[in-house]
Image (tube, rainbow, N blue to C red):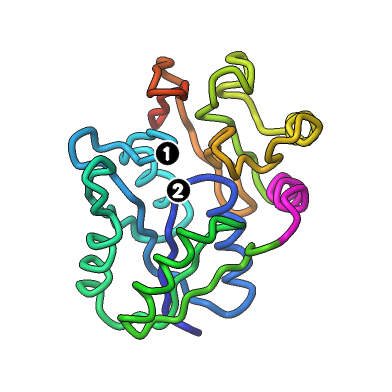
C-alpha cells in the first residue's frame, strides 16, 4: 500500500476523501491540519485542535498540526516544512472539489517533494459529495456564513434539504464557497462523544465550540 498523508479539516470532504483513498490502496498514516498558532484553532471552521486530535484518535490516524498564521499567509511554507520532517511519503490526499488556486499550491508543494497529489473528489457533482458523505457519516454544521444559513442549524446534522435549499438560491450545496463547514461526529468505523459549547463570531462567520465529552 502507498504510504500517504491527508490534509484534514475534520469535515465531510476529509472523511469522504479518506474512505476513497483507502479503497484505492493508499495507507494514510498522517492527518495534517492548518492550525492558527495564536488561537490553536483550525482555520476556516475554528475548531479547537484538541477536538480534531480526539476525532483522529478514533479514526486511527496520527494527528500532525501545521502551525501558522492566516494573516501572515505562511501555511503553505509551513506545510512543506512539516512534510519534509515526516520523511518517506509517496502520496498526499486532498479533499478539494473545485478550488483551483488551492489545488495549484498543493500540487507545487507535492511536486517539489516528489509526492503524488491525489484529489479523490475533484470535479465531482457537489450534490453527490453531500449524498455520499451522508451515506457514510454524520457531519454536523459547526460554522455558517451569516445571513445564508439559520443560526439554529449550528450543531445540527447536515441534511439533503439544507443542500437543496442552498442550490435553489444559486449557492454551493456542499459549502464550497464558505457557506458552511462541517465536523464528522460519526463514521462507519468510529463514533465521538462530544459536547456542544458556546457560539462565537469570526468576521462574517458564526461558529460553535466543540469539546470531547465523557
Q: Is residue 11 visible?
A: yes
Mark 2 lies on residue: 9
| Mark 2, other Cα within 10 Å: few <14 / some 14–19 / many ≥20 | many
Q: Is residue 6 above or below residue 11?
A: below
Residue 149 figure quarter = top right
Give the residue at x 31% y 37%. Answer: 41
Quadrant occupied by the C terminus: top left
Residues at badges 1 and 2 in contact (C-beta under 8 Å)?
yes
Q: Is residue 190 magenta?
A: no
Q: Is residue 194 above or below residue 49?
A: above
Eye-nearest disc, 1 or 2: 1
Structural distance between the alpha carbons of marks 1 and 2: 9 Å
Where residue 96 sits: x, y (%)? 55, 58
The image's mark for residue 44 is 1
User: Which one is earlier in the sequence, the residue at label 1 or at label 2?
Assistant: 2
| Part of the protein shown in magenta | 124-135
| Mark 1, other Cα within 10 Å: few <14 / some 14–19 / many ≥20 | some
Instruction: Judge by depth and name the residue closer to the eye, 193 or 68.
Output: 68
Q: Is residue 73 above or below residue 213?
A: below
Where residue 151 sits: x, y (%)? 58, 15
Give the residue at x 61% y 57%. Answer: 97
Instruction: Judge by depth and name the residue closer to the eye, 86 or 37.
Output: 37
Give the residue at x 66% y 43%. Answer: 174
Amino acid at each position: 500500500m502507498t504510504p500517504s498523508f491527508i490534509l484534514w479539516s475534520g469535515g465531510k470532504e476529509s472523511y469522504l476523501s479518506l474512505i476513497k483513498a483507502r479503497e484505492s490502496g493508499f495507507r494514510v498514516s498522517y492527518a495534517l491540519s492548518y492550525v492558527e498558532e495564536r488561537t490553536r484553532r483550525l482555520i476556516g471552521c475554528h475548531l479547537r485542535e484538541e477536538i480534531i486530535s480526539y476525532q483522529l484518535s478514533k479514526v486511527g490516524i496520527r494527528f500532525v498540526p501545521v502551525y501558522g498564521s492566516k494573516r501572515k499567509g505562511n501555511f503553505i511554507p509551513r506545510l512543506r516544512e512539516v512534510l519534509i520532517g515526516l520523511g518517506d511519503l509517496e502520496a498526499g490526499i486532498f479533499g478539494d472539489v473545485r478550488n483551483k488556486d488551492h489545488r495549484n499550491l498543493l500540487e507545487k508543494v507535492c511536486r517539489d517533494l516528489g509526492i503524488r497529489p491525489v484529489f479523490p473528489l475533484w470535479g465531482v457533482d457537489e450534490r453527490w459529495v453531500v449524498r455520499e458523505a451522508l451515506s457514510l457519516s454524520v457531519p454536523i454544521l459547526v460554522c455558517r456564513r451569516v445571513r445564508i444559513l439559520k443560526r439554529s442549524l449550528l450543531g445540527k446534522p447536515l441534511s439533503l434539504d439544507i443542500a437543496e435549499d442552498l442550490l435553489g438560491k444559486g449557492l454551493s450545496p456542499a459549502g464550497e464557497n464558505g457557506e458552511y463547514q462541517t465536523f464528522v461526529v460519526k463514521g462507519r468505523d468510529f463514533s465521538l462523544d462530544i459536547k456542544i459549547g458556546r457560539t462565537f463570531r469570526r468576521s462574517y462567520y458564526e461558529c460553535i465550540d466543540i469539546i470531547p465529552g465523557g
